[in-house]
């Protein structure tokens, strides 16, 4: 069955640079009718750049166009990227964007998803949605106290002097819940999270990764 | 999701009637229908690409031909998007310093003794440039603009000269207010003390652009500090609330006392500026030494550098919470800066108006420093020009003669003293205030020194690169995090105040007496008189009548009344909105509480009636694993739903895990 290449809207020059088979070239050209999904990474050079970075993570024998669209890269490989190396949320990011059943590998589409959500052109709604999923450490759809605890620990680091004491942590989490939990059920759901984020103009500029 | 959903669809050969589906599946079907029928474009959906492909397939299955109209619309959208991208890229090229600002943000952030005969000339030229005398006959200053009597030609230079500063100030006012309002709309509901709320600080505090391990560690340290400080402040606030009346009175008294003390210091500083200006103007023609020429700008800079140090020291003595300390110090620094500029202008004007003991009304000659000459506008222009130049060179001197050597010494020498000294800390508020003060000086000089903005633009351009170099190479980051968004509003407010400080004297000058011997308005009693005269020459009588009406009371009083009515309506509407929000919040809380009571009742009933393991209390603790669906919680983002309903499980039975939200209290 033919894969749907509709998102892969490269120019001729870029195709030639990427060195793919004539058959694939025809397929890619024929698919230019469809609007790409990723208007966020709308500029073709940005997508081509993402493709180049992705291909570098693949083993040498699969560094061609057809394989790169099929093959998945394991999380360990993705974590070696310089953009993610220093990020305390890197494992969560990989987990959230992965569509594999075990959530341990990313395909090129997932990779593209990742960078398009973190790009400048993604809307604040999409960013806040994915931020919520990244901060939801136990994947249950809400931010409860343990999630918030993990979040604060990620933010302050593991050092002895930077970690908050347990009483400080308790006070901080109570504060957060008091300010954000509108329906007082002890957890922050997506709407409440988006409500808090919408009031904060710094969010879009901080939730950004540039390739 | 597509893998999961295709699995589900393969088990259902034909769609079953709704009542045979489990509640989870019913919700799922409803959600899929909602997604398919909604008009939200695919790019705006927060799902993975294969899910979006599925949704697109469901919305428009294969085989349906795309109509010609839709094809054309798609093509048009593509072209439109292409143009927008091109436009954005072009704007990016013209956007000054965009990459530099990104780089800064992502970074955690320096004549001979006997004058030779040949050098004398150069010395004199330099001297003339620095005092502005070289430019006195050029268009840099007010005095050299001359023109004959008004004619009714199309272009009146007088009108242009008068209206340009006013228009410029009006445009700046509009631009600043617009940016302030934009920032205000996004602003969160501020807690007490007008600080951003802690929850949004927590969620927004990690900068995902950080790539460097060291920068990440620094960021983590600063986050930790920030949280600890906020928590301490809150503890203090709680303690303060529990104080007795007597303690509170004592606190208030000491607060007022501190403010009065600082206020007196500010008044002292300002009077120093007044006397310095008076002194330098009185003895200006007697000796042309550098010190006297630049005495006023020097005193202003001295007062503005010592002031913050003294204020900071005094405020620290009182042991206030850190935020209050910073706010208080910042407030008084701003007051000092703006009032010193205002006093400078005022004292200049005083000096040029009073002519003690000199009564000759000689005409305005170049190189004539008679303080009683009638061309006082030139004088004021010169002083503002000197102030501008002095600020710029002082900034350069600090950057290259103090910060750079300090960094070199600290990095290369070892010793207790150098370790303690450390690199200079880059204080954002101080630098921003300096820029605001420079801008205020430029605004003040618009009328007297028309080319001053050009000079300021050049200075600002170079200032940026010097500051960038200083920040990235010679400074260390401040340990205290600087909250950009709330501070931006404050600094825009200060900019607006500076605009006010610059506008009020200008309005006064325009409507009052002007020099008789130089400039464009020498034949008028006040510069503003040009406007009625120019209008009278150019417009027909009915048009003139209309203009008179616009300037009269009969027009402005009704406008004022209408504006007050509109303001009252807006305020009452916002009050009503606030009450509505409160009511809705209460309602939401009751409903959610009611829902959880019902769920508890249900689980109790099931426990009593069923007795099978699936419903037992152990299901409360075990969180059954769900196939990872594509969205958090079920079934779709945006709607608050109870947790743990499963999206059509692969288990044979439905297992409802019902942990209560108040899980800690009920086991």
Image (spheres, rainbow, N blue to C red):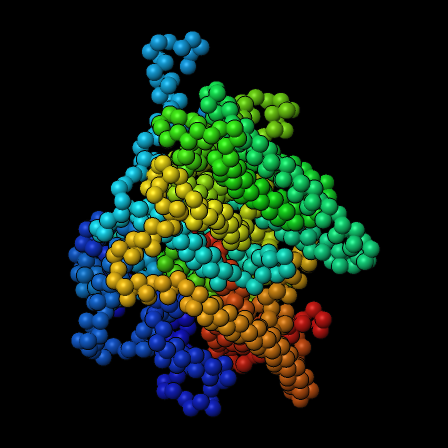
Q: Is residue B414 left or right of residue B17?
A: right
Q: Looking at this view, is B599 or B101 the one in front?
A: B101
View extreme (front): residue = B359
Residue at figure coordinates x 58%, y 57% from the top left: B196
Q: Is residue B210 left or right of residue B154?
A: right
**Residue A26 appears left or right of A169:** left
Residue plotted at (45% across, 70% down): B558
- Horizontal and vertical percent position of residue B128: 38, 24
Above or below: residue B667 compared with residue B469? below
| Quarter occupied by the N terminus of chain A | bottom left
Q: Position of residue B414 (x, y in %)?
A: 59, 22
The residue shown at (47%, 91%) is: B19
The number of numbered discs placed on residues in the rendered structure image is: 0
Residue B456 versus residue A205 in the image, above or below = above
Q: Nearer the viewer, residue B119 or A182?
A: B119
Residue drawn at (37%, 31%), measured in percent from left and top? Answer: B364
Quadrant location of residue A161? top right
Q: Is residue A44 visible?
A: no
Q: Nearer the viewer, residue B428 or B380?
A: B380
Residue B159, image x and y in percent? 31, 49
**A157 or A43: nearer the eye?**
A43
Coordinates of residue B205 in the picture (x, y in percent): 54, 53
User: In the picture, residue B60 is in which quadrant?
Assistant: bottom left
Work out whether A156 lies above or below A198: above
Please say whether residue A154 is visible from this viewpoint. Answer: yes
């Amino acid at each position: 069955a033919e894969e749907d290449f509709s998102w892969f809207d490269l120019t001729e020059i870029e195709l030639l640079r990427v060195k793919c088979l004539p058959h694939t070239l025809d397929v890619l050209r024929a698919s230019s009718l469809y609007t790409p999904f990723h208007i966020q990474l709308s500029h073709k050079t940005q997508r081509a750049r993402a493709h180049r970075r992705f291909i570098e993570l693949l083993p040498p024998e699969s560094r061609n166009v057809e394989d790169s669209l099929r093959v998945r890269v394991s999380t360990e490989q993705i974590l070696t990227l310089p953009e993610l190396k220093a990020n305390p949320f890197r494992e969560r990011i990989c987990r959230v964007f992965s569509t594999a059943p075990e959530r341990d590998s990313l395909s090129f589409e997932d990779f593209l998803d990742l960078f398009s959500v973190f790009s400048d052109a993604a809307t604040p709604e999409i960013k806040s949605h994915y931020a919520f999923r990244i901060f939801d450490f136990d994947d249950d759809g809400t931010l409860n106290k343990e999630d918030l605890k993990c979040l604060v620990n990620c933010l302050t680091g593991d050092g002895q002097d930077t970690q908050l004491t347990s009483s400080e942590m308790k006070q901080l989490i109570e504060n957060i819940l008091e300010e954000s939990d509108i329906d007082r059920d002890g957890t922050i759901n997506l709407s409440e999270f988006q409500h808090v984020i919408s009031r904060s103009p710094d969010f879009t500029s901080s939730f950004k990764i540039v390739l | 999701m597509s893998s999961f959903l295709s699995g589900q669809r393969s088990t259902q050969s034909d769609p079953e009637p709704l009542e045979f589906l489990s509640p989870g599946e019913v919700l799922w079907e409803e959600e899929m229908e909602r997604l398919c029928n909604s008009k939200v474009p695919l790019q705006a959906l927060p799902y993975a690409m294969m899910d979006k492909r599925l949704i697109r397939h469901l919305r428009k299955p294969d085989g349906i031909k795309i109509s010609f109209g839709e094809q054309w619309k798609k093509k048009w959208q593509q072209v439109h998007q292409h143009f927008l991208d091109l436009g954005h890229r072009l704007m990016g090229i013209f956007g000054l310093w965009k990459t530099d600002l990104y780089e800064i943000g992502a970074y955690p952030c320096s004549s001979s003794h006997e004058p030779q005969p040949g050098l004398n000339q150069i010395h004199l030229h330099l001297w003339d440039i620095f005092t502005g005398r070289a430019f006195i006959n050029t268009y840099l200053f007010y005095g050299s603009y001359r023109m004959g009597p008004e004619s009714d030609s199309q272009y009146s230079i007088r009108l242009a000269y008068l209206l340009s500063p006013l228009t410029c100030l009006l445009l700046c006012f509009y631009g600043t207010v617009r940016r302030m309002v934009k920032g205000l709309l996004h602003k969160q509901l501020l807690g007490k003390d007008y600080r951003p709320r802690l929850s949004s600080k927590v969620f927004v505090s990690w900068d995902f652009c950080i790539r460097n391990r060291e920068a990440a560690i620094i960021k983590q340290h600063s986050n930790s500090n920030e949280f600890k400080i906020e928590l301490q402040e809150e503890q203090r606030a709680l303690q303060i609330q529990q104080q007795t009346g007597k303690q509170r009175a004592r606190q208030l008294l000491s607060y007022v006392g501190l403010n009065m003390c600082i206020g007196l210091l500010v008044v002292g500083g300002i009077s120093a500026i007044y006397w310095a200006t008076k002194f330098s103007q009185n003895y200006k023609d007697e000796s042309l030494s550098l010190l006297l020429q630049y005495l006023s700008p020097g005193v202003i800079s001295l007062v503005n550098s010592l002031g913050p140090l003294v204020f900071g020291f005094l405020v620290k003595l009182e042991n206030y919470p850190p935020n209050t300390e910073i706010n208080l110090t910042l407030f008084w620094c701003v007051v000092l800066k703006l009032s010193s500029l205002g006093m400078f202008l005022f004292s200049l004007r005083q000096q040029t108006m009073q002519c003690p003991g000199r009564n000759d009304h000689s005409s305005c000659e170049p190189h004539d420093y008679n303080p009683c000459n009638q061309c006082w506008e030139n004088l004021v222009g010169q002083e503002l020009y000197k102030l501008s130049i002095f600020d710029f060179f002082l900034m350069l001197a600090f950057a290259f003669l103090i910060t750079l050597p300090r960094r070199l010494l600290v990095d290369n020498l070892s010793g207790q003293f150098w370790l303690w000294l450390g690199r200079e800390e880059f204080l954002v508020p101080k630098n921003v205030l300096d820029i605001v003060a420079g801008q205020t000086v430029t605004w003040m000089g618009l009328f007297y020194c028309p080319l001053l903005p050009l000079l300021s633009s050049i200075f600002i351009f170079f200032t940026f690169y010097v500051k960038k170099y200083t920040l990235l190479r010679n400074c260390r980051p401040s340990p205290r995090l600087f909250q950009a968004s709330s501070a931006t509003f404050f600094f825009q407010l200060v900019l607006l105040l500076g605009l006010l400080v610059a506008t009020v004297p200008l309005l006064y000058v325009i409507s009052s007496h002007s020099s008789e011997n130089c400039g464009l308005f020498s034949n008028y009693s006040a510069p503003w008189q040009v406007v009625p005269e120019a209008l009278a020459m150019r417009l027909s009588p009915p048009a003139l009548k209309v203009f008179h009406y616009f300037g009269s009371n009969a027009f402005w009083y009704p406008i004022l009344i209408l504006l007050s009515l509109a303001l009252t309506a807006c305020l009452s509407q916002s009050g009503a909105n606030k009450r509505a929000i409160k009511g809705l919040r209460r309602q939401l809380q009751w409903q959610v509480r009611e829902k959880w009571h019902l769920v508890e009742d249900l689980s109790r009933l099931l426990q009593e009636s069923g007795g099978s393991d699936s419903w037992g209390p152990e299901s409360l603790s075990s969180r059954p694993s769900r196939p990872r669906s594509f969205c958090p919680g079920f079934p779709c983002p945006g709607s608050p739903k109870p947790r743990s309903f499963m999206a059509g499980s692969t288990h044979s039975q439905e297992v409802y895990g019902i942990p209560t939200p108040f899980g800690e209290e009920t086991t």
